[in-house]
Image (cartoon, rainbow, N blue to C red):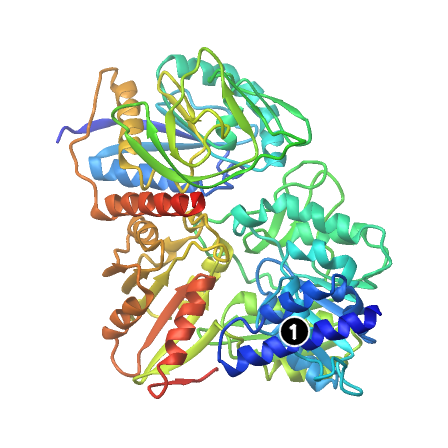
């Protein structure tokens, strides 16, 4: 009876998705799940049980979508049949939607397909859905201060994650970033397997003038020491009072070279070493790549294949996506918290001070952006001070952003809450062949994408 | 413009720990405005185990998570008598959110731990364990200090603060929750010490509050009543305050419907 109910729920969800798709409406990633979920209460749980190869979850503050996207490439090449929420809809309804959109018109799975669920899950939602998903592999990326108004403080998320994995048979395996002391702690609560990943590069050091850490103390309450700090509180940490220290990671990135448009590193898994080159800049891209590699390794994928796949990856929606309009490039950089912002600034800094930067900085204060915009004061905008920046500020909190840039010594040329107007005004100052960098919070990123994709004819979507 | 040769001494307390709600923005605003007014600043960062400098004209303390508040509460006990002496001596003080709570009499966190405060403000704070309280959102208050006027920011706290007989509130709430969500009071004042829940950060976009704190610091340094409100503010500052008020009013009206 329940199975029939689930099936009806899925068929209706799928139908909703198709109608939305035909009508070219947004929301095809959440509404089908909402519809299905209303009909059958324990749908997520029974759907997850159907996955004979199990469920994989990817969670953390920064890098969920990119890591999941990287895994997509690897698992595809490895021949896995899987359901995934690639569009970044990572709450319960988004997970159910991913299932609903993958069934056939009778609500069943096509033969021999979709045996694995690969889901990015919102870091706060994870604890709520963990019992239903019962992941075979759960990957934990990092925890930074982010949307404190919505998620609460980092400490409370840390303790919820600990409770979640404590004394359980599932997940069979956790994959953790040992560079983050809060994430690393999870292994103490875990009875199953643990795969670790991290960066091993003494030459990389933090370059911000100002940096906030969201993990400061060991469990005895003493301050952590760092031999190397990579970003925020991520690095080679240890505690002088107790014996806790970052363990050597099983999967690591070494010999890192960060370029303006790409990153190059050695992927090291046990005795194997591979050269990886990814056409996306930024240290966090490397974290996402090794997180994906470690997760694939936990699923039994051969290291050769992991390395080969990582060399083929491309940027997902709104994450360093590049559009072209009137021979001008527009690069969208999603940014929603101080740590992400600092890394983004490092990406847009040109190699020479004589090269100008054209920047559209958009700050929205919707629920998905974080209603509290004060985090802009924790980001080190001052890193851009010495550069020649043509700056336009936009979004619902354009004026807050403009003031923050002003205090950093960079006065915007234009402050305008209307995103479309700002986008065209920002492009005005760029000559053909030039590039506009767009730093945007979540809903702002969606708006910019929608403006660029709807003015068809002039704009070709060219994902790098 | 009068020149101020003797710098004002700013003590930033626990900047590495009590910085959860972008409290660094307040320091940036002070440095920015001081430069504009030709006031020199000597900044001292004082964290766990650090001694206070001999002189101080302005004290800043920001917000932290429960675990962090617990960590500093022990250290604050050693620093309490000096802080009280400075408050009595009319040193300019701004305590925000978690720091504000710890500058009261005591704070009981959500786990039921009692943290003793510095007792500059006659105030107690309780994070209720049964009926959860959380004040999260944009807030607009009118200060009881005439020179300060309207103040806008963001609040995010689980503690409810109640003022005792010896304390007066910093402001009355126009939009938002304030000290406890009940009596429409926000923050506390004792002499030149101001406690408030507002971050955002609060000083960059509330120039009159910023000037008030600086004037008090300057008056303390020169031992005379100085009000250097002579330099106008950048349009970026004024525009940010107006826009934030607009957003706060609109969001609040939308929620009321």
Residue at the image position 31 percent from the left and 79 percent from the top: A434
Residue at the image position 34 percent from the left and 53 percent from the top: A401
Front residue (pair A392, A276): A392
Kindly state the secondary structure of the residue where label 1 is placed: helix
Residue A77 to residue B218: above or below: below
Quarter of the figure with residue A236: bottom right
Give x and y (percent) for residue B154.
Answer: 43, 41
Give x and y (percent) for residue B237.
Answer: 26, 44
Quarter of the figure with residue B159: top right
Residue at the image position 64 percent from the left and 65 percent from the top: A93
Residue A337 to residue A428: above or below: above
Q: Please indicate, yes or no, whether residue A118 appears anywhere in the rendered image.
A: yes
Mark 1: give few (<14), some (14-19) or many (20+) Cα within 10 Å: many
Q: Please indicate, yes or no, whether residue A349 appears anywhere in the rendered image.
A: no
Residue A213 to residue B215: above or below: below
Residue at the image position 61 percent from the left and 47 percent from the top: A154
Give x and y (percent) for residue B129.
Answer: 66, 31
Number of callouts in the render?
1
Front residue (pair A108, A354): A108
- Chain letter of disc 1 in the image: A
Image side of residue A75 versus residue B208, left or right: right
Image side of residue B11 versus residue A11, left or right: left
Give x and y (percent) for residue A463.
Answer: 48, 82
Front residue (pair B257, A78): B257
Image side of residue B47 versus residue A386, left or right: right
From the image, tell me which residue sits under label 1.
A13
| Quarter that holds the N terminus of chain A | bottom right
């Amino acid at each position: 009876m329940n199975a029939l109910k689930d099936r009806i729920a899925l068929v209706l969800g799928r139908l909703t998705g198709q109608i939305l798709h035909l009508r070219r409406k947004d929301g095809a990633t959440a509404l089908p799940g909402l519809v299905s979920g209303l009909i059958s209460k324990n749908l997520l749980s029974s759907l997850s049980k159907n996955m004979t190869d199990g469920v994989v979850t990817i969670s953390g503050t920064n890098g969920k979508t990119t890591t999941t996207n990287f895994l997509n490439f690897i698992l595809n090449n490895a021949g896995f049949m899987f359901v995934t929420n690639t569009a970044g809809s990572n709450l319960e309804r988004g997970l159910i939607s991913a299932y609903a959109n993958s069934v056939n018109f009778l609500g069943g799975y096509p033969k021999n397909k979709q045996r694995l669920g690969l889901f990015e899950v919102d870091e706060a939602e994870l604890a709520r859905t963990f019992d239903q998903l019962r992941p075979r592999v759960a990957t934990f990326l990092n925890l930074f201060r982010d949307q404190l108004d919505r998620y609460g403080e980092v400490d409370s998320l840390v303790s919820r994650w600990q409770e979640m994995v404590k004394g359980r048979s599932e997940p069979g395996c956790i994959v953790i970033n040992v560079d983050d002391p809060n994430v690393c702690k999870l292994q103490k609560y875990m009875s199953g397997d643990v795969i670790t990943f991290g960066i091993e590069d003494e030459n990389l050091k933090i370059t911000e003038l100002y940096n906030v850490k969201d993990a400061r103390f060991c469990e005895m309450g003493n301050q952590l020491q760092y031999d190397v700090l990579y970003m925020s509180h991520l690095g080679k940490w240890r505690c002088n009072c107790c014996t806790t220290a970052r363990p050597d990671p099983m999967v690591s990135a070494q010999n890192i070279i960060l370029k303006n448009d790409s990153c190059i590193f050695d992927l090291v898994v046990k005795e194997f070493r591979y050269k990886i080159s990814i056409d996306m800049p930024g240290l966090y891209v490397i974290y996402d790549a090794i997180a994906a590699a470690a997760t694939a390794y936990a699923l039994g994928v051969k290291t050769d294949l992991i390395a080969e796949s990582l060399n083929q990856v491309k940027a997902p929606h709104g994450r360093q996506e590049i559009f072209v309009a009137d021979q001008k490039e527009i690069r969208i950089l999603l940014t929603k918290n101080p740590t992400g912002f600092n890394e983004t600034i490092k990406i847009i800094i040109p190699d020479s001070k004589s090269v100008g930067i054209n920047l559209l900085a958009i700050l929205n204060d919707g629920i998905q952006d974080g209603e509290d915009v004060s985090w802009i004061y924790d980001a080190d905008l001052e890193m851009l001070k010495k550069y020649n920046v043509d700056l336009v500020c936009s979004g619902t909190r354009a004026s807050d952003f403009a003031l923050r840039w002003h205090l950093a010594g960079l006065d915007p040329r234009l402050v305008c809450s209307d995103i479309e107007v700002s986008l065209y005004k920002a492009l005005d100052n760029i000559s053909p062949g030039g590039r506009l960098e767009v730093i945007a919070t979540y809903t702002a990123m969606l708006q910019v994408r929608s403006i660029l994709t709807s003015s068809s004819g002039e704009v070709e979507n060219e994902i790098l | 413009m009068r020149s101020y040769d003797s710098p004002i001494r700013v003590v930033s307390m626990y900047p590495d720990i009590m910085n959860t709600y972008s409290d660094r923005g307040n320091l940036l605003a002070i440095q920015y405005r001081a430069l504009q007014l030709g006031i020199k600043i000597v900044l001292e960062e004082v964290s766990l185990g650090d001694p206070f400098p001999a002189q101080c004209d302005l004290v800043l303390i920001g917000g932290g998570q429960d675990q962090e508040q617990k960590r500093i509460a022990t250290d604050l006990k050693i620093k309490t008598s000096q802080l009280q002496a400075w408050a009595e001596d009319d040193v300019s003080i701004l305590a925000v959110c978690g720091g504000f709570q710890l500058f009261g009499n005591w704070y009981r966190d959500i786990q039921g731990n009692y943290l003793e405060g510095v007792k500059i403000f006659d105030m107690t704070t309780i994070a209720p364990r049964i009926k959860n309280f959380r004040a999260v959102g944009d807030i607009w208050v009118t200060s009881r200090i005439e020179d300060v006027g309207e103040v806008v920011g963001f609040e995010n706290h689980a503690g409810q603060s109640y003022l005792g007989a010896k304390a007066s509130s910093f402001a009355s709430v126009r939009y938002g929750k304030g000290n406890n969500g009940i009596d429409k009071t926000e923050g506390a004042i004792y002499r030149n010490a101001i406690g408030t829940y507002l971050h955002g950060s609060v000083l960059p976009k509330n120039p009159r509050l910023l000037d008030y704190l600086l004037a008090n610091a300057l008056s303390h340094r020169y031992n005379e009543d100085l009000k250097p409100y002579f330099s106008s503010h950048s349009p970026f500052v004024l525009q940010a305050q107006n826009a934030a008020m607009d957003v706060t009013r609109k969001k609040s009206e939308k929620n009321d419907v």
